[in-house]
Image (spheres, rainbow, N blue to C red):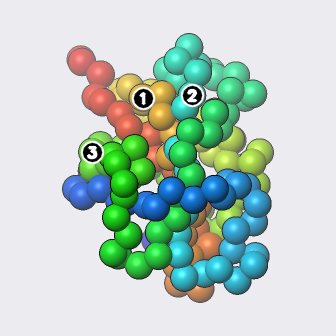
Amino acid sequence: MEETGFLLLDLRAPLEYAEAPVEPFSRLFSAGDNACEFLFRFELDEAQAGRIDPAPESFPGALVFSGRREGAETRALNAADALPAGLYAFAQKRRELRREECAAMAMDLQKDAIWEGHHPGSILYLRLLFEDGSPVTQLFRPCQRLPA
């Protein structure tokens, strides 16, 4: 999958991860660890999570979970250790992003979701994986369609 702008993604099954103390912006794939993927869950400030002009310093938010997955058999210990099934505002880039780049992409995703009539929740998921010979950064924001 190529780089994306805003997409609405209906994730049909959860992606589960084993909790792992991993730093999200530490160039995880530069060490040659290409056989696994990582998930980070950030909690955004409620006041900023629904604004079309959010404060840049509020992104990516407070880290509340870091996990690692190797193969399809990883099982989460509890629901908080997963990217749950559901409707998401989604974007990706075909490289591993630095913190500043990830924050900018997250703000753009939020603006696009709101512009398209969706209410993004206050959770931001960052997923890092290695696909087709290169690292991929994906962002997910749970969202609901705003009433017309």
Q: Amino acid at mark 2?
A: Leu
The image position of residue 113, as x and y in percent, is 44, 34
Whether residue 9 can be seen here = no
Q: Residue at x 38, y 26 (%)?
A: 119
- Real-space Cα separation, disc 3 to disc 2, in angstroms: 19 Å
Between residue 61 and residue 22, name the one nearer to us: 22
Residue on which disc 3 sits: 86
Q: Is tag 3's residue or tag 2's residue first in the polypeptide sequence?
A: 2
Task: Find numbered disc 3 in the image and state the secondary structure of the residue it sits on.
Answer: strand
- Real-space Cα separation, disc 3 to disc 1, in angstroms: 12 Å
Q: Amino acid at mark 1?
A: Gly
Task: Determine the residue located farthest toward the front in the rendered image.
Answer: 77
Q: Is tag 1's residue or tag 2's residue first in the polypeptide sequence?
A: 2
Disc number placed over residue 121 in the picture, else none: 1
Between residue 21 and residue 45, name the one nearer to us: 21
The image position of residue 43, as x and y in percent, is 55, 32
Between residue 102 and residue 21, name the one nearer to us: 21
Whether residue 33 can be seen here = yes
- How many other residues sit within 10 Å of disc 1, few (<14), some (14-19) or many (≥20)? some
The C terminus - image quarter: top left
Indicate the quadrant where residue 29 lies.
Answer: bottom right
Q: Residue at x 62, y 73 (%)?
A: 135
Q: Residue at x 72, y 29 (%)?
A: 56
Q: Is tag 3's residue or tag 1's residue first in the polypeptide sequence?
A: 3
Q: Amino acid at mark 3?
A: Gly
Residue on which disc 2 sits: 44
Indicate the quadrant where residue 75 lies.
Answer: bottom left
Residue 42 located left or right of residue 58 = left
Between residue 7 and residue 66, name the one nearer to us: 66
Residue 5 located left or right of residue 118 = right
